[in-house]
Amino acid sequence: MDTIVTLPQPDLKGSIPLEQTIAARRSQRDFASKSLTLEQIGQLAWAAQGQDVRSRYRTAPSAGATYPLELFVVTEQGFFHYLPGKHALQRLTDQDLRARLAAAAWGQEFIAAAAVTLVFAAEFARTTGRYGQRGIRYVYMEAGHAAQNVHLQAESLGLGSVAVGAFDDDSVSKVLELPSHLEPLYMVPVGYCRR
């Protein structure tokens, strides 16, 4: 498959103050069946792992700029790998994997209902190769930083999101056909809320 989908340039001037976004953010699990635009998906991916065009630095801090995280995007239209340097999505399949991903997360059906689920996976060796066992902690810290960016970005776009850590790692890896060097760490379903 391997189609590259170039994303619209991210909006760098939000319309909601950061403090207001922080105050309003809450976990949401009751998603409406409404798709997100490519602009919205691109903005979420950029918030998670966007890369400065003048440097290799990303939107979330990384110990020693080792960048162990890989971001994957699961939608009704397919499964994608985010390419930070190109601000693009690489389509890995056109299958809708949301229901299978929900099953791998011990039946949390809101994952199947969400328009998009961002999946953070890590190659720990990128960071432990430099920092030894301490690097494991740094990878988990980085996943938290990146996911919080997504939660705040979702709120600023008028979308709901929720943190998901309850899933079977092997089952998620199998559903997404992740290479053996990547471990799934964190999922963030995002979508319009039923209100």
Image (cartoon, rainbow, N blue to C red):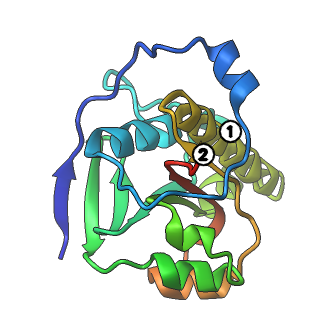
Residue 178 visible within the image: no
Q: Quadrant of the C terminus?
A: top right
Residue 153 left/right relative to 145: left
Q: Position of residue 76 (x, y in %)?
A: 34, 69
Residue type of the residue flagged with mark 1: His
Residue behind mark 2: 195
Please state which of residues 38 and 160 is positioned toward the viewer in this rendering. Answer: 160
User: Looking at the image, which residue is at 19% across and 53% down?
Assistant: 5
Residue 36 visible within the image: yes
Disc with the residue nearer the chain's start (2 vs 1): 1
Q: Secondary structure at mark 2?
A: loop
73 relative to 16, above or below: below
Please state which of residues 97 and 175 is positioned toward the viewer in this rendering. Answer: 97
Residue behind mark 1: 145
User: Looking at the image, which residue is at 56% across and 49% down?
Assistant: 193
User: Looking at the image, which residue is at 43% across and 44% down?
Assistant: 45
Q: Position of residue 132 (x, y in %)?
A: 78, 56
Please state which of residues 49 and 97 is positioned toward the viewer in this rendering. Answer: 97
Residue type of the residue flagged with mark 2: Arg
133 relative to 78, above or below: above
